[in-house]
Structure formats: C-alpha cells, structure tokens
Image (cartoon, rainbow, N blue to C red):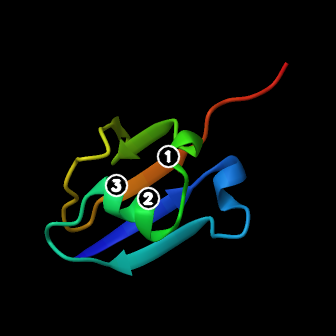
Amino acid sequence: MKITIKLFATLRDGRFKEQKIVVQDTYRIIDIIIQYAIPREEVSICLVNGRNVQPEQTLKEGDTFSIFPPVGGG
C-alpha cells in the first residue's frame, strides 16, 4: 500500500520533507520511526491524516503520516 510521510523541523535534517513510500498492510507508525532511525525522544507528535495517534497505530492505504519533534525555545 502507498502512504505519505511528512517530517517537520529538525526531523528533516539529513532526511527529507515529504516522501511517498510503499509498505506492507501491517505497517505501523513505530515501524516508520525505526526504519528512518528517528530516536523516540525526538518524536513528540504523530498525526495520521491530521489526527493524533499512538506509535502502535497501523497505517492504511493513502494515509498521510506526519511527525513533529518536541517544541523548543526560550
């Protein structure tokens, strides 16, 4: 199945902004985080089609998965 992955802010460093990939039907959000070697502590918000989800969420055909790092600043 085809899905779209969007990375934001510092998660883009050395990776990509948006990418379409083909994955197995049982693919989960955590599988993407592991595949792209994103440390768990760098993942703050996970959205699928604009809705907040947990890392164990299974993805579906056509989903758009967005990952945001923790917000920083001062």
Give the amino acid type for the residue marked by disc 2 in the picture: Ile
Label 2 element class = helix
Query: What is the distance, in whole Å, between disc 3 and disc 1 at their CAs?
Result: 9 Å
Q: Please, is residue 22 above or below residue 57 in the view?
A: below
Do tag 3 and tag 2 residues touch (Cβ < 8 Å)?
yes
Give the percent coordinates (x, y) of residue 20.
43, 75
Do tag 2 and tag 1 residues touch (Cβ < 8 Å)?
yes
Give the percent coordinates (x, y) of residue 14.
72, 69
The residue at the far left in this view is: 25
Query: What is the distance, in whole Å, between disc 3 and disc 2 at their CAs?
Result: 5 Å
Quarter in which the N terminus is drawn: bottom left
**Which residue is label 1 attached to?**
40
Disc 1 crowd rating (10 Å Cα; few below 14, some 14-19, many 20+) is few
Give the percent coordinates (x, y) of residue 12.
67, 60
Disc 3 crowd rating (10 Å Cα; few below 14, some 14-19, many 20+) is some
Give the amino acid type for the residue marked by disc 3 in the picture: Ile
Quarter in which the C terminus is drawn: top right
**Which residue is label 2 attached to?**
33
Dot 3 or dot 1: first in sequence order is 3
Do tag 3 and tag 1 residues touch (Cβ < 8 Å)?
no
Give the percent coordinates (x, y) of residue 40.
49, 46
Label 3 element class = helix
State how many labels appear. 3
User: What residue lies at 65% left-to-right and 70% top-to-bottom?
Assistant: 15
User: What residue lies at 39% left-to-right and 63% top-to-bottom?
Assistant: 32
User: What residue lies at 46% left-to-right and 51% top-to-bottom?
Assistant: 66
Q: Quadrant of residue 4?
A: bottom left
**Which residue is label 3 attached to?**
30
Give the amino acid type for the residue marked by disc 1 in the picture: Arg
